[in-house]
Amino acid sequence: MENDFQKIANRVSVITIIGNVVLSVMKLVAGIIAHSSAMISDAIHSASDVFSTFVVIIGIRLASKKPDKEHPYGHERLECVAAIILSMVLFITGLGIGIGALKNILQGSSGNLQVPGILALIAAIVSIVSKEAMYWYTRHYAKKIDSSALMADAWHHRSDAFSSVGALIGIGAARLGFPVMDSIASLVIFVFIAKAAYDIFKSAMDKMVDHACDEETEQHIYACVMENENVMGIDMLQTRIFGNKIYVDVEIQVNGQYTLQEAHDIAEMVHDDIEHNFPKVKHIMVHVNPAAQNDQAE
């Protein structure tokens, strides 16, 4: 399973790296030839995607390592670290684009802005289609293997598609007689990038600080435990997300007249039921409490 996880992530990453290299070179050339600051900014964004995908590959490789003596619970959180690094790279990239756009807008009053050529317009359209395709492709496999780092990379592609839409609008408006719109489009691109960076960072941090599962998942786990006819009640159920895995701690009530072996067997059955029905659950701790006397009497 872990091998497949890494193979799928690596294959998706290599394909997107090749696509981003081709796109960034195309947009950079088009931006320079067509005198479009928005398209040059977009090219820088695509180039940052190449770096971010390398971070994803490294993060997933480290997260896939088996537990060892020093890390008995595994290395899944290293994937969250990769996602946090991605969010920071994304924000810094966007900030650079935003500062450059602001400078161009301030210079616009002196009439130094050039009208972008048709080549920049074509490059923007090609970029939108390509990056949206990369987003859906990466998102599909990120969901399939439940990878937060790969999902962060997918959103990086989507933010690039948004930035290309902004570039397209800005370039189009500039060609219609409003050259400052090309730089304003770059400023809008920064806003999209900053939002994507924040979402990626928040999601990764939630997984780093032992965030509980959503209420629906906990209710399903509760129902799964109570399906065992020997379980008379649940005193405590806690969950925590560890990387892309779930850890479960549950205290169940059983008949206090049962032998230690019988109580142990029930706990094993509960453990196996949760493990079978919830593939994302990596570790389950089942503690057995004797049911209250009045419960047993009933």
Image: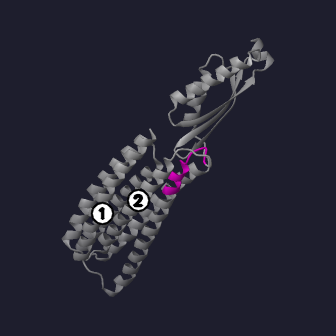
Q: Nearer the viewer, residue 17 or 291?
A: 17
Looking at the rendered structure, the kind of residue marked 1 is Val
Residue designated by label 1: 21
| Crowd class of label 2 (few under 14; some 14 to 19; many from 20; radius 10 Å) | some
- Identified by mark 2, the residue type is Phe
- The residue located at (61%, 44%) in the rendering is 72
Question: Can residue 273 be spotted in the picture?
Answer: yes
Q: Label 2: which residue? A: 54
Q: How many marks?
A: 2
Quadrant of the rendering where the C terminus is positioned? top right
For the point 38% across and 44% down, the residue is 141
Magenta span of residues: 71-82
Q: Relative to residue 136, is residue 178 depicted above or below? A: below
Q: Nearer the viewer, residue 166 or 136?
A: 136
Seen at 33% across and 67% down, the residue is 42
Query: Left or right: 52 with respect to 290?
Result: left
